[in-house]
Image: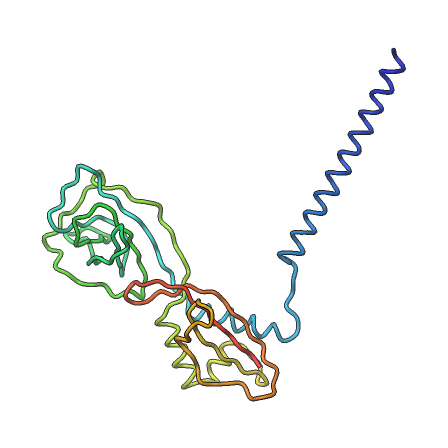
Amino acid sequence: MLKKRYIGRKGKKAVSHVDIILSFVIFTGFLIFLIAIFKPFKISGGEEVYLDMAERKIRDLTSTEVKFLTIRLNANTEIENCFCFDYDFSNVTVKNKNYSFVNALSKEKGKGRKGRKVCIDNKEVFFYIYSCEDFKEERFDSSNCIDLEENNYTLGLFRKYDMASWRKLNELNKSYEENYDEVKNEIGLPGSKDFSFNIRKTEAAGEVILRVKKEPPKGVKVLARDIPIQIVHENGTLNYAILNIRVW
């Protein structure tokens, strides 16, 4: 009996070692798979570095911050025409639950109170609120709007997004056409390299909606990259597009 028990323990120990080895092999294989797919240590080589430089700088020059918030009026809150609530947003656009724009603005609280408030010209109960320096607010007479107390409404989670500004993309396009050497120098490309960019819709063979005029000469090697972006417009519209960058 003692001998059998001893052998059993050895068997269990051997099985335990096999389990450990198999677990290690599976784990190592999974790590290799992840590294092969995502290539976290990939270093851009050769002329791809210039594409990286152009992409990074164009993103920096055209990026803008969009803040997002939702508000829901409580069931016992009565609104005649419009309302305001305290929140430190500037340059707002607002949509109702059907994603249709409604008149809204942001302004100082007034009467010796610090901070800002958002006013919405609508009697519905749920709204999406966006704030961005690019937005041009639709002004309306908010003098008769009801100032809500905090127990009149519930705010959703606050979020921030980096998007491409349509205004800044057009400004970059204009600077490119008028002062190409200056823009190229800001991008950081050497004198032997040139670049161009365009914006097109996301559909296959999508329409080009913004393009610079400069084209690479025939016969030269051209590196190109498509980058998905989300564009924010001055009227509050958001849409997806493709930024194409070429370096030669």
- Residue at the outermost bottom position: 218
In the image: residue 27, left or right of residue 13: left
In the image: residue 65, left or right of residue 104: right
Q: Is residue 113 above or below residue 64?
A: above
Could you say which quadrant of the image residue 173 lies in?
bottom left
Residue 38 position in % (x across, y down): 62, 56
In depth, the one of 88 and 129 nearer the eye is: 129
Residue 238 position in % (x across, y down): 35, 62
In the image: residue 93, left or right of residue 32: left
Q: How was this image coloured?
A: rainbow
Q: Is residue 53 above or below residue 83?
A: below
In depth, the one of 84 and 173 nearer the eye is: 173
Could you say which quadrant of the image residue 164 lies in?
bottom left
Q: Quadrant of the N terminus?
A: top right
Residue 187 position in % (x across, y down): 51, 76
Residue 197 position in % (x across, y down): 47, 77
Q: How many marks?
A: 0
- Residue at the outermost top position: 1
Q: At 49% from the left edge and 80% from the top edge, which residue is drawn?
A: 196
Q: At 13% from the left edge and 45% from the top edge, which residue is drawn?
A: 79
Q: Is residue 75 above or below residue 14?
A: below
Q: At 21% from the left edge and 48% from the top edge, which residue is drawn?
A: 85
Q: At 10% from the left edge and 47% from the top edge, which residue is drawn?
A: 80
- Residue at the outermost right position: 3
Could you say which quadrant of the image residue 121 lies in?
bottom left
